[in-house]
Image (tube, coloured by chain):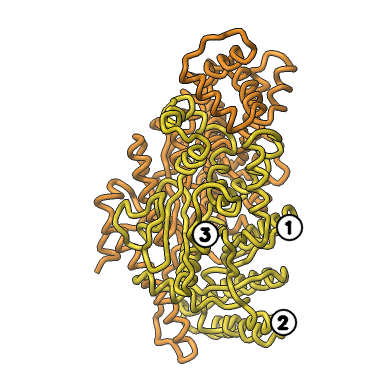
Amino acid sequence: MSLPFLEQRILICIGTGGVGKTTLSASLALRAAQEGKKVLIYTMDPSKRLASCLGLENWIGHEIKIKEFSNGGELWAAMIEPKKVFDRFVRAHAKTEEDVQKMLNNRLYRELSTSLSGSQEFTSLYALNQAYKTEKFDLIILDTPPAQHTLDFLQAPESVFNLFRGPIVEWFSKLTQKRSGIMSLLNKGTDMVIGILEKLTGAKFLDELQVFFLTVSSWRESIQQMVIETHEIMSGEQTQFLLITNLDDSRIFEAQEVIGDFKRNGIPIHHLVFNRVMADHPIKKKPTEQEAPVTLFYEKWKDGEQKQIAKLLDLEERAFRGVEFWRVDQVAHSENEMEILETLGGLFRKIQERKEYTT
Amino acid sequence: MRNLFKNQVQDGILKTMSQQAQFPLLKPITFVTGKGGVGKSVIAAAVALLESQKGKKIHLVELGEKSFYEKFFHLKRGTIQYQPTEIAPNLFISLWSYRSCLREYVGFYIKSQKLYDLFFENPVMQKFIQIAPALKELAILGKATSAPRNVGPTNPFDYLIIDSYSTGHHKALLTAPLAMSQTIHQGPMGYHSQKIFEVICDPDLSTHLLVLRPEDLPTIEGLEFYHFLKDKWNIQGQIILNQYLQFPKTTNELKELMQLADDDGIQKICQYFYKVSVEQENCFLQVRQEKAKAVCVPYSFDKEDVFAFLCSLNEKIKPL
């Protein structure tokens, strides 16, 4: 059986933290490659073991081929590093080497390029778009930052764009003029705000901000172009979203929120994957006295999960309308990461219907 | 697992530890963090409930725009706000967004309501807040540390328990004041950043509970953060190994059952549990090698009654 979400050109995997999203994304990439596709997995912050499995331990900044299959399938991998992406952008747009250095050394730039809310999200979309434009791959899978910040993800292109346009840049240029005494007349509101800001932050902080904003104000057009393209990637036909979570109460609550947030922003999530569901192991005989406590423990576990799934299917009408449910079984820990990926790729199963679980 | 505990109790050092164990040791400001999905919010609530039942006045804080505890405690929508609400005797919960924290912080400097509104309604200012590095973090930590720094309103609580972000973001939260104080030496912001950082590092004022799960990766990551705190800032974190599975058989027994089983299903079940059990023991071992202050909490299947569930967690906390 082929998985519907591997038939698109771009698959964006989002997920609540700690649910095995990165590993599952990689397993899907491997599966698609085994099926004969040229696949690129863009991963974020992989564990050491996964990184070494994907050949990303000492990654130098471009996609690398990890595996080839006789049916023509290829598995490629790359990493998202916001700082590298931003630096590349600065180098491409600054007019002189001096400007490049001025920017790269600006403390605020350094902070922003690594910790600005949405910077990871934005750079991953940017990198995705660059790879998509090369038309080298049948499928690109993007592993995203934890979904605690999914809204950041959706709003990333816009919020980065907002950063460089509109009042804030003008405002800081006015501030320069004012402080250098060129401009004496400012509107009263701005004047007061500057006063308070200075009081709060100290004059030096404002200086740093100013240098930053004045430098980037000249890049407005290219940033706008970049933002439009990344937005198209997210909302385009070629892209599908997969939300990965598990059956914990709090995770389900988060999943509901995420799906709602996306819907409100005009982007539907079609597939919801529950990872680490206990596998079905039918018992065909009466357990021995020794075995009984273990099988009882197993059944208690399965029971708990089935209750959760039943609860979910109950919620389906309101929160999860139009969303397909999938499950992936628990896989025991193993030293061989590639083996795990291969196993996981084969474990995607659709949670068929309500009656399977509700009694 | 039972076997594991037997070993631990027999172990002299651990025995003494368990007798002395008063866990977790709360400080006026207690941060709870951990990798996503390890159950840190639930642990924070359990610790808060435990202390509130001992008669301490507890302020449990969640960070962000949306409340988790509202759903968790089955409270009416909108119950949990910026100002603390008492949801059980002595247990107060509030939700801090960076916006509200900053508003309060700025309000402290600007006494005039008109000026204050102007500051916050200014569109430039709103953008500035969104993008200014470290400002959100500082606003939150500024609020959290306001009592020991003697700024802001008086604090009627014995303990502040903050259900903080997951490890990565928590690290960013803690790093912000230091980065800021190094960037800006002068001005109120530089001064306060320095003070905030001092409070966070002061073992008499703050403590950090690190919630781990006895699985390979969460344990490695959790211990990495434990070392980061210890090596970089000399902060001694307290570790909670959460949701370990209490198998009815020891690891060796599971292995034996797996080898003897004549039913395919039972064989696979035992095999899976055996592997998990080995992984768990390995995680326990790693944490014990750290000689850190640590406890463990078993996984509970029954979570219907939230308060009963939290109390049961409190009873089940065992020294590691």
In the image, is residue A192 above or below residue B303?
above
Q: Do labels 2 and 1 touch, CB within 8 Å?
A: no
Which of marks 1 and 2 precedes in the sequence?
2
| Disc number lying in front (3 or 1) | 3
In the image, is residue A345 above or below residue A248?
above
Which of marks 1 and 3 precedes in the sequence?
3
Q: Quadrant of the N terminus of chain B?
A: bottom right
Horizontal and vertical percent position of residue B119: 46, 29
Secondary element at image label 3: strand
Circle 3 crowding by C-alpha within 10 Å: few under 14, some 14–19, many from 20: many
Circle 2 crowding by C-alpha within 10 Å: few under 14, some 14–19, many from 20: few
Which of marks 2 and 3 precedes in the sequence?
2
Q: Chain of mark 1?
A: B
Question: In the picture, residue B75 is in which quadrant?
Answer: bottom left
Residue type at mark 3: give it: Leu
* Inter-mark Cα distance, 2 to 1: 24 Å
Horizontal and vertical percent position of residue A263: 33, 40
Residue type at mark 1: give it: Asn
- The answer to whether dots 2 and 1 both sit on one chain is yes
Q: Nearer the viewer, residue B200 or B281?
A: B200
Q: Which residue is mark 1?
A: B234
- The answer to whether dots 3 and 2 both sit on one chain is yes
Secondary element at image label 2: helix
| Residue B13, disc | 2
Q: Chain of mark 2?
A: B
Residue A210 shows in this picture: yes
Horizontal and vertical percent position of residue B248: 50, 83
